[in-house]
């Protein structure tokens, strides 16, 4: 297992920017790595990516120095384990709304005594052929893996004060579109009430000493979020391509 550069940056108060990708092609991860992004998040929720494909995507990330993360489709310990065993360095879990949800996530991600993750001769542990013994590998993994619940509904916001007390969580990522729908705004998160809610959530997360994250469609949006204390900014692969294409096509403008 390698050092989690993204987690190190976040712990040092430095922002990180990356992509949430629904591609199963490792070449896409390579391209993102060579492009200088901080992290590549495999979208295991809104995509057909299978756990069998994750290892090659992670290898592509490691080759280019981009940190591999994953959004897993359900808070299921065995499913989470497959992503972790492949070598992803962090888990973002959608739709975490209660303390029980958050505690289950931590248990799945962490080895004992902090959780119940199983240990074996897998890629993440160098197939037990590396220089670390089991105790060292367990402690290192518990320290390095990033744990990021996603807040996506009104129930999560109502429970935020309690969620912030759950041990083992590094931060929270706000899902603005699903949150807006949960609040009754079905046409998107552009409404003032949604914006105020998100701003309040970010402030509470920061005051708790945790990492606040959310989506950004452009570099300007990311900069504005960072100025407000959001350190974890992610764009979809489609959004990233659109932003880059739009900037490129300005060259055709009269």
Image (cartoon, rainbow, N blue to C red):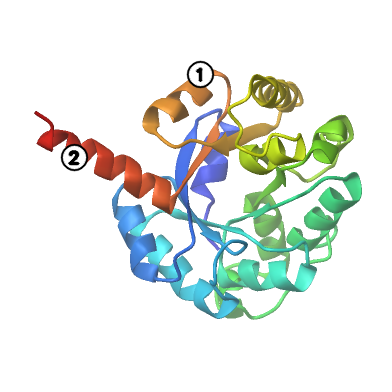
Which percent across, then down, holds residue 217? 44, 37
Single out the residue that lies furthest toward the left.
254
Which percent across, then down, holds residue 234? 50, 42
Which percent across, then down, holds residue 213? 60, 36
Which percent across, then down, holds residue 19? 45, 49
Tell me which residue sits at (59%, 70%) in the image: 124
> Compared to 98, does 224 lie above or below?
above
> Image quadrant of residue 205?
top right
Tell me which residue sits at (72%, 43%) in the image: 152
How many numbered callouts? 2
Image check: 194 left or right of 11? right
> Compared to 190, does 30 lie above or below?
below
Binning the other alpha carbons within 10 Å of mark 1 as few (below 14), some (14 to 19) or many (20 upward) gives few
Tell me which residue sits at (33%, 40%) in the image: 243
> Compared to 63, does 7 lie above or below?
above
Label 2 to label 1, Cα distance in Å?
Answer: 28 Å
Position of the C terminus by quadrant: top left
Task: Tell me if residue 171 can be seen.
Answer: no
Depth check: give the residue in front, 43 or 153. Answer: 153
Image check: 71 left or right of 169? left
Depth check: give the residue in front, 139 or 213. Answer: 213
Mark 2 or 1, nearer chain start: 1
Residue annotated with mark 2: 249
Depth check: give the residue in front, 2 or 205. Answer: 205
Residue annotated with mark 1: 227
Depth check: give the residue in front, 251 or 215. Answer: 251
Position of the N terminus by quadrant: bottom right
Disc 1 is placed on an element classified as helix
Task: Tell me if residue 3 can be seen.
Answer: yes
Q: For the residues carrying marks 2 and 1, which lies nearer the camera in this image?
A: 2
> Compared to 202, does 234 lie above or below?
below
């Amino acid at each position: 297992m390698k050092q989690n550069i993204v987690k190190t940056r976040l712990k040092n108060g430095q922002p990180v920017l990356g992509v949430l990708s629904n591609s199963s092609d490792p070449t896409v991860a390579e391209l993102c790595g060579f492009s200088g992004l901080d992290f590549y998040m495999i979208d295991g929720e809104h995509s057909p990516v299978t756990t069998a494909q994750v290892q090659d995507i992670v290898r592509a990330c490691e080759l280019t120095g981009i940190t591999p993360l994953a959004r897993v489709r359900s808070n299921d310990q065995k499913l989470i384990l497959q992503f972790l065993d492949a070598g992803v360095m962090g888990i973002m879990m959608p739709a975490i709304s209660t303390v029980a949800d958050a505690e289950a996530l931590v248990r799945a991600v962490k080895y004992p005594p902090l959780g119940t993750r199983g240990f074996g001769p897998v890629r993440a542990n160098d197939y037990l052929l590396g220089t670390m013994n089991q105790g060292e590998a367990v402690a290192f993994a518990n320290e390095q893996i990033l744990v990021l619940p996603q807040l996506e509904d009104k129930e999560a916001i109502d429970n935020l004060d309690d969620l912030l007390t759950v041990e083992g969580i590094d931060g929270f990522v706000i899902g603005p579109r699903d949150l807006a729908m949960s609040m009754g705004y079905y046409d998107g998160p552009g409404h003032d009430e949604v914006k105020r809610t998100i701003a309040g959530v970010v402030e509470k997360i920061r005051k708790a000493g945790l990492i606040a994250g959310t989506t950004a469609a452009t570099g300007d949006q990311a900069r504005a979020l960072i100025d407000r204390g959001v350190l974890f900014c992610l764009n979809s692969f489609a959004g990233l391509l659109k932003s880059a294409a739009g900037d490129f096509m300005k060259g055709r403008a009269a």
